[in-house]
Amino acid sequence: MKRKYLDRLDWKRVIQRRYIEKFIDDKYFKGYLSLLYIDKAREPLVVNINRKELILVNDGYKWMQHMPINKHYAVTTMIDNNNKIIQWYFDIIKRNGIEDGRVYFDDLYLDIVHLPSKETLLLDEDELKDSLENRIITEEDYCLAYDEANKLLAEIERGENHIINRSMVYLDNIMK
């Protein structure tokens, strides 16, 4: 299982950064909200999603992350240098918490990408299966990952995901 930190201090692609983190407790979300300003990237991060080339990291981009308390997912909203959302990336997780003052999550490999075009993709099922076969995760973890992903996929399809629906509100909040 991979432990990831919201501050992404180990990320070599980003060579100049600013980071903000706060705890939010409102009607729609309870947990940690962070914003990583990517002031300078070593090189852009370009991915191909559904035959579309997306730039996820470049100079002036932002990654806003939601880490809800007592949930089994974390959301990264990737934002370009014009404050336009590129995608929402849901990591399905086993747990989250704070270690040495840093907010973290333990990634269960399964991911969901949701695009502004309303396309939604379930990713990395092979990684989840491999981690089970190699005994990195348990059968319980495997089922948890799919249960959480299926709940999120249904919520996204119904248009009821508050993080997606209120992303710009949260961006304004953390930038103040």
Image (cartoon, grey):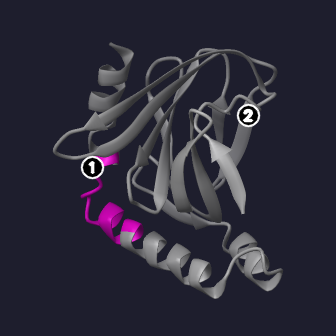
Q: Which residue is mark 2?
A: 45
**Residue sitting at 24 percent across and 58 percent down?**
160
Residue 90 visible within the image: no
**Residue sitting at 62 percent across and 35 percent down?**
100
In the rendered image, residue 33, in percent from the top left (x then y), is placed at 41, 34
Seen in the picture, residue 136 relative to 18 is either above or below; the reply is: below
Along the viewing direction, whichever of 28 and 118 lies nearer the viewer: 28
Q: Which residue is mark 1?
A: 162
Q: Please check the rendered image and state whether residue 161 is part of the magenta-colored stretch, yes or no.
A: yes
Residue 111 visible within the image: yes
**Residue sitting at 33 percent across and 36 percent down?**
167
In the rendered image, residue 152, in percent from the top left (x then y), is placed at 39, 66
**Lateral position of residue 155 relative to residue 35, left or right:** left
State the CA–CA distance, disc 1 to disc 2.
27 Å
Q: Main secondary structure of the magenta part?
A: helix
- Point out the image quarter for the N terminus: bottom right
